[in-house]
Amino acid sequence: MDIRGIDTPLLDWTGDTLALGLFEDAMELTGILQELDEKLSGTLRELIEEIEFEGKPNNSAVNRIGSNSPIRKVILVGLGKTEDLSLDVVRLGAATISRLAKQAKVKTLGINLPVVNDDVASTVNAITQGIILSLHQDKRFKSEPDKNGLKLERVEILGCGKNEKAINQANILCSGVILARELVAAPANSVTPVTFAEIAQTIAKDHELDIEILDREKCEDLGMGAFLGVAQASDFPPNFIHLTYKPSETPQKKLAIVGKSLTFDSGGLNLKGAGSSIETMKMDMGGGAATLGAAKVIGQLKPDVEVHFICAVTENMISGCAMHPGDILTASNGKTIEVNNTDAEGRLTLADALVFAEKLGVDAIVDLATLTGACIVALGDNIAGLWSTDKILAAQLREAGSVAGENFWEMPLEEKYFEGLKSPIADIKNTGPRAGGAITAALFLKQFIKKTPWAHLDIAGPVWLDKENGVNNSGATGFPVRTLVNWVLNQ
Ligand code: BES
Ligand code: MN
Ligand code: ZN
């Protein structure tokens, strides 16, 4: 499928299907829309009246036009109120249009959506994202080819000029989102600590990033007892991945992105029981998947910032040499941890990864993790939790998320709750009381950061959707690759 921007005026466009966005407070067909309606023998007006199309955000319609027309079908999507127009509105509009065009077996599609804040490049970028991300479907594990595959051959974005650069950038961004989706969706017998590391190596090679992979022995040398404690019951060797993007000129800023990378989380000896969705725990490397997705994009967009991508990859399994509940581990900063619950394993792997990241001397560290069920209870699956020791960093991430159309809600690092992590025998326990579980998890991580501005994103909800939503189809979303990339580019 080819996506391009074209200069052809709306009235002169010919092709299979023309898609238009309409605002709910500007539903009268005036000006160019009136001319278009006349050209289409009044079909637009008829369609709007017939289905009582109101231009509200979820409204949409498809209609066949008489056979003499230069356009075979028209698609309408509602954009909501003019004053609420944003990049997310056009991104979602493009997604709705693309899904309808797919259903209607459209081959060539023209999309006419408004420009947001006079920013043509960002508008075209967002529209392209909406098209690609809503149409992506993962058929890798089906043995038969898809009979209902996409017929769409060409999409033309009208009214924004050629804008090859914006379309190209969106394509690159989406390749990172799709990589993350495919890593998350692949089962744990496909994405293992070994294959995950191989994929990181491929990214490094393809996009000229430096890569260092620490095996168990090297992790032992660095004293990563927390990470290795989690890894000790897996038949796969753990891999600690460190990818580095270095710009050609001396960078003003150095950043680290750290992703929780459990290719499967059985819970360990605190085994996940019925009702705890053990069968979905292939998604527990969602943070690492988005980290690699972001690395793939940053390696191609080549911003003026140095970025370190870190994934401590393993499984959380059971065996005769599994961690016992109650074991005490020593992390690489010397802190001792009483493992009162082996299912709170993500924070153990992240502890050593955060210590490693801080030693790199970066200006900011962001970790992303499918860390707690408690965060899903608090915020649902549309919103990720955001904790930060630094107001500026938190604001940067919120802004990057809002431009990306990914939702974050800032949560408190309530020091009082640290009481719940005190251990009678070690420095800390890995699990506090049930109440405020997402907050104590964040407080646990904070113990492994000394002074670098740090933010923690609990993405347990948004990495996976049971139902199609926005640009995402059901299943893996690739959250929050778009936010991470925006954050890096805006430095
Ligand atoms: N990977 C899970 C968190 C999770 C749960 C992600 C559901 C996605 C969907 C994490 O390792 C975990 O098991 N957390 C426990 C922590 C508890 C033992 C303190 C949880 O949330 O129940
Ligand atoms: Mn767990
Ligand atoms: Zn987990």
Image (spheres, rainbow, N blue to C red):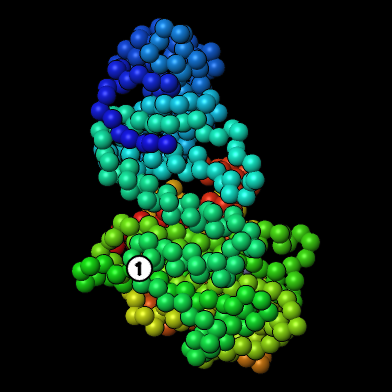
Quadrant hosting residue 238 = bottom right
- Which quadrant of the rendered structure holds the N terminus? top left
Vertical comparison of 280 with 117: above or below? below
Q: Residue at the spot x=71%, y=81% of the render?
A: 322
Q: Residue at the spot x=30%, y=44% of the render?
A: 166
Whether residue 12 can be seen here: yes
Residue type, numbered disc 1: Leu
Query: Which sits in the foreground, 294 or 218?
Result: 218
Q: Residue at the spot x=53%, y=25% of the render?
A: 104
Q: Residue at the spot x=39%, y=66% of the render?
A: 204
Question: Residue 289: x percent and y percent?
Answer: 51, 61
The furthest residue to the left: 249
Vertical comparison of 86 with 223: above or below? above
Query: Which sits in the foreground, 206 or 268?
Result: 206
Whether residue 122 can be seen here: no
- Which quadrant of the rendered structure holds the C terminus? bottom left
Question: Residue 129: x percent and y percent?
Answer: 41, 43
The furthest residue to the front: 144
Question: Residue 433: x percent and y percent?
Answer: 68, 74
**Where does label 1 land, which residue?**
209
